[in-house]
Amino acid sequence: MGNIDVACTGKLNEIVATAQSLVSLTRTRDNTRSLTDCALACGAIAAYANVVDVTPGGGNLAAAYEIAEPGDTLQLAPGDYYGPLHIKKALTVRGAAGAAIIGPGEGSVIIVDAPDVVISSLRITGSGSLHQNNDAGVKLTQTAARAVVEDNHLIGNLVGVDVHGAVDAQVRNNTIEGRTDHRMNDRGNGVYVWNSPGAVVEGNYITKGRDGIFVNTSRNNVFRDNRIENLRFAIHYMYANDSEISGNVSVGNHLGFALMFSSGLTIRRNISIGDRNYGIMLNYTNSSMIEENFVKDGHEKCLFMYNANKNTLRGNRFEGCAIGIHFTAGSDRNKVYENAFVGNRIQVKYVGTKDHNWSVEGKGNFWSDNAAFDINGDGIADQTYRPNDIIDKILWTQPSAGLLLGSPAVQLVRWAQSSFPSLLPGGIIDTAPLMRAIEIPMSDRAAATQTGAGG
């Protein structure tokens, strides 16, 4: 045992000098097995394969990082650790309950500069405030392929997670609370995705800051099952094609889902409740599927379509907004059917002269203000529905004409149009209006709104 004791003493002194007696390290690789054997023989180091146990204290996190080898896990005990932490090798950094990494108020708190890194179960705060650098709680660079950021609480950072070119990165099940110390437009975003094909952002709760998720110049991404509250835009989306936006819940934001300059999107089963301006905006969004979304109680417009072409809108429910759909700027060749327009003050706002038939293969949409008959009981109303007449269009272009709404002349024009449909202008028509509205069940995340819960 004498030689073993001497060897153990030498190895332990090396560990003490490097990790300041507060980091324990064991490995199972052949080239470091003697260190494990010494640790077990001396009883001074816990035998956790490929795990570096880290305790709070000055320099301990940096020392643990230097000791760790690719594939290892830094396991942080409860307490505060001081960043920034720049990760350049494939590691997992995982915290026990109460473990926090605190930045110096400059730059990003954690920078990931290597593939296959996992950041998990930490409280992360203390980023800088420079928009030009996207100072963030966690920054994933272009070399951070397949990085995973999960189960963290990121609070008070300019940007929560900056996915900046990291292919196939995953940001999931985090709570992200941004800043409130600037005007909303001067704050940062919860998750920023730039040029990161294959990135997945799912299951996060995001509040405060500017936009919940901001996407710019990317493709083949998934944004799923996030809940986003009290921001400017829940999801702000530009120049990002062939992606999925599904199962997200937007509550009390200025705008729910702002989808712009993109094509090939699948926008499915999202919910917007009480968003101020629009629930969904499609601006130069083309060749996309918009289905089974639910927009409720928007202060202005449930859906705004601006120069959006060749899309399919099916099975959506637009309820309780000032305007159900504002359809404008040459939007054309869209299929709009099996939707429900319920209790909107104006169901459709369309000023053009071209006819658009919103029915497909004998199925149109449900209109709550359509006092229709269905004599044969096939679920389709017996008469074509037109949401607008010539008086509506006059009011939209000349709002002051509203003073004449009660005049006999206006009433006569409306009576004539209803009696002689050929007098009606071009616009939206539904030749097969539905007699019954579709119902869209609330997801658990949306149902939490009813009790005021968040996250």
Image (cartoon, rainbow, N blue to C red):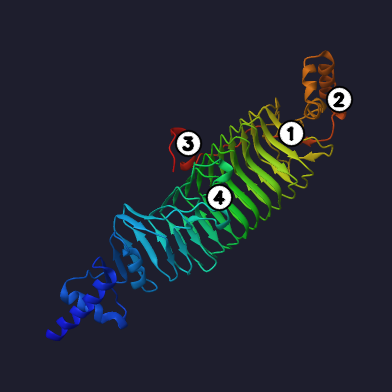
Residue occupied by mark 1? 349
* Label 1: which secondary element: strand
Q: CA distance from mark 4 to mark 3?
A: 20 Å
Amino acid carrying mark 1 in the image: Lys
N-terminal of the pair, mark 1 or mark 3, is: 1
Pointer 2: residues within 10 angstroms few (<14), some, or many (20+)?
few
Quadrant (top left, top right, bottom left, bottom right) of the C terminus:
top left
Amino acid beneath label 4: Ile
Mark yes or no: residue 232 visible: no
Amino acid type of the residue tagged 3 in the rendering: Thr
Q: What distance separates the C-alpha of mark 1 from that of mark 3?
A: 29 Å
Q: Amino acid at mark 2?
A: Phe
Describe the element under mark 4 as helix, strand or loop.
Answer: strand
Rendered residue at 86%/25% (across/down): 420
> What distance separates the C-alpha of mark 4 from that of mark 2?
50 Å
Q: Earlier in the sequence, mark 2 or mark 1?
A: 1
Residue 22 picture location, percent across and down: 25, 65
The residue under label 2 is 420
Residue at the spot of label 4: 213
